[in-house]
Image (cartoon, helix red, strand yellow):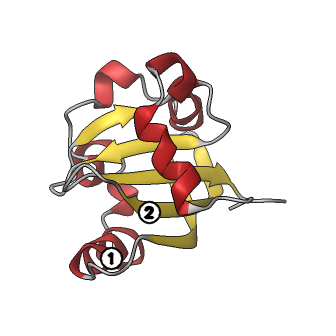
Amino acid sequence: MTGRDPSRLEAVLDMPAERFDELPFGAIVIDRDGAIVSYNEYETRLSQLARERVIGRNFFRDVAPCTAVREFEGRLRTFLRTDHTVSEKFDYLFAFPHGAVAVEITFLRLRKKGQILIAVERAAA
């Protein structure tokens, strides 16, 4: 991801909702069970899923079932088991109903115990 460092991503938690929606990348906050806590406007446009439809639902089962695979959910579960790791980045191909989109993903363990930020940015062409 372009210039993403964990301390800057962590600031996402403290920003007002309107600034969260202005971020130039998708931002999804989930709890340890995968329930979506926050979902910004960029991610709404990328996924074509309204925020009201996703908040409180399970990211892996209800919202983005294409991520319920070892390469994404498995990687997140491993990330959660390693307490010393603050962030992890990797490339992923989201299989949206409206077409596949290559993205760069960053997982970030947030200060609020048990919450994870999933930052999503379109991969450079």
Q: In the rendering, at what x and y percent does residue 53 appear?
A: 30, 24
Q: In the rendering, at what x and y percent does residue 103 appear?
A: 63, 58
Q: Considering only order in the chain, which callout, 2 or 1, is on the residue closer to the N terminus?
A: 1
- Corner quadrant of residue 90: bottom right
Q: Secondary structure at mark 2?
A: strand
The residue that mark 1 highlights is: 79
| In the displayed structure image, the side of residue 60 where residue 17 appears, left or right | right
| In the displayed structure image, the side of residue 12 where residue 24 appears, left or right | right
The residue that mark 2 highlights is: 107
| In the displayed structure image, the side of residue 24 where residue 40 appears, left or right | left
Above or below, 77 relative to 63: below
Above or below, 2 relative to 59: below
Residue 125, numbered label:
none
- Corner quadrant of residue 36: top left
- Corner quadrant of residue 70: bottom left
Neighbourhood count class around disc 2 (C-alpha, 10 Å): few under 14, some 14–19, many 20 upward: many
What residue do we see at 22% from left, 52% from top?
A: 34
What residue do we see at 50% from left, 43% from top?
A: 11
In the orientation shown, which residue stands out farthest toward the left?
A: 33
Q: Are marks 1 and 2 in contact (CB under 8 Å)?
A: yes
What residue do we see at 48% from left, 73% from top?
A: 88
Q: Secondary structure at mark 1?
A: helix
